[in-house]
Image (cartoon, helix red, strand yellow):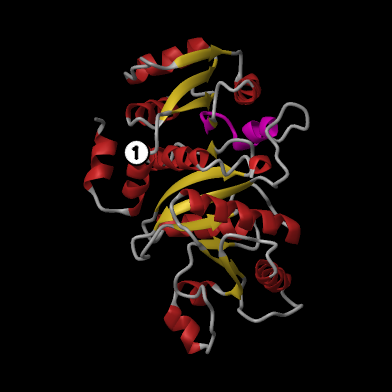
Amino acid sequence: MNDALHHSQASNDKLARLIARAVAAGPALPCAVVHPVDASSLAGAMEAAEAGLILPILVGPARKIRAAAAAAGIDLAGALIEDVPHSHAAAERAVALVREGRAGALLKGSLHTDELMAAVVARDGGLRTERRISHCFILDVPRYHKPLVVTDAAINITPDLETKADIARNAIDLCHALGIARPKLAVLAAVEIVTSKQPATLDAAALSKMADRGQIEGGIVDGPLAFDNAISLEAANSKNLTSPVAGDPDILLVPDLTAGNMLAKQLQYLAGAESAGIVVGARVPIALTSRAEGARARLASCAVMKLATAMRITKHGDD
């Protein structure tokens, strides 16, 4: 058993429980690892394979993959290699493996997110569904009592109301996959009052009403909520704010990508949060990892990806 998995199982933190839940959720998931030509992305894929989370299909230049593995002392036993000439071809081939039924998920390797997502969202041959694709950070914040999802912090730059509704639906579906039966979603803004001077509050109020009317199902949605009264019941009470979400959200839906990215990274770098990252709303889930992430974060991303697949949250046409 690798050290990262042993540590995660031995501890009692939130990411450990997600990893353990995913390991127990059936057989390993066939996964196309896109352009894993550096030690970090190869190690992440092979650690997830050793943990029983994925069956890796390494898609990229075979010579570079093998050279990177040899230089880092990484054993590629059990991994298949799909030899393609460069990162662009790797993204296209990985998407094709999903469409052929050979892969049930994608794991980002050593290429830009934009390059991978261009193949995913391609009109012809991509992995679109009727939903807008969005990203979720799943954060283990030491001072918060349960996993916290922040969305969208990586895909949709300035989402409109309809896009935010899909971002909410995707996040609620993901929480169902994580074992949360009725997740609470806080729609964030700078203030908790509805005012035309701050359009984010109008969208938040509309999303809340959409949930009341059954247009967004499966969770409890409230907003606008400022960050303090979303996270702290005491802060909400101090403003005489009554909310079914205040103090206990599972999901924070942010106004735009900039706010979400800053919030997630502040929680990571200032509050010591560990994270997993996953793209949802496509035909299959896509785990996004970076070189800055540790081994447990990579494992957690693959764990969330496996749980998402088990719940078929990306196959909305089958609902």
Residue 160 visible? The answer is no
Q: Amino acid at mark 1?
A: Ala
Q: Where 167 sits versus 55, above or below? A: below
Seen at 63% across and 20% down, the residue is 100
Q: Residue 268 colored magenta?
A: no
202 relative to 276 in the view: left or right: right
Seen at 65% across and 32% down, the residue is 115
Quarter of the image for residue 69 reads top left
189 relative to 15 in the view: left or right: right
Q: Nearer the viewer, residue 40 or 147?
A: 147
Q: Nearer the viewer, residue 194 or 162?
A: 162
Magenta span of residues: 106-120
Q: Position of residue 98 (x, y in %)?
A: 60, 26
Q: Residue 109 colored magenta?
A: yes
Mark 1, residue position: 24
Seen at 63% across and 26% down, the residue is 95
Q: Where 72 sits versus 221, above or below? A: above
56 relative to 71 in the view: left or right: right
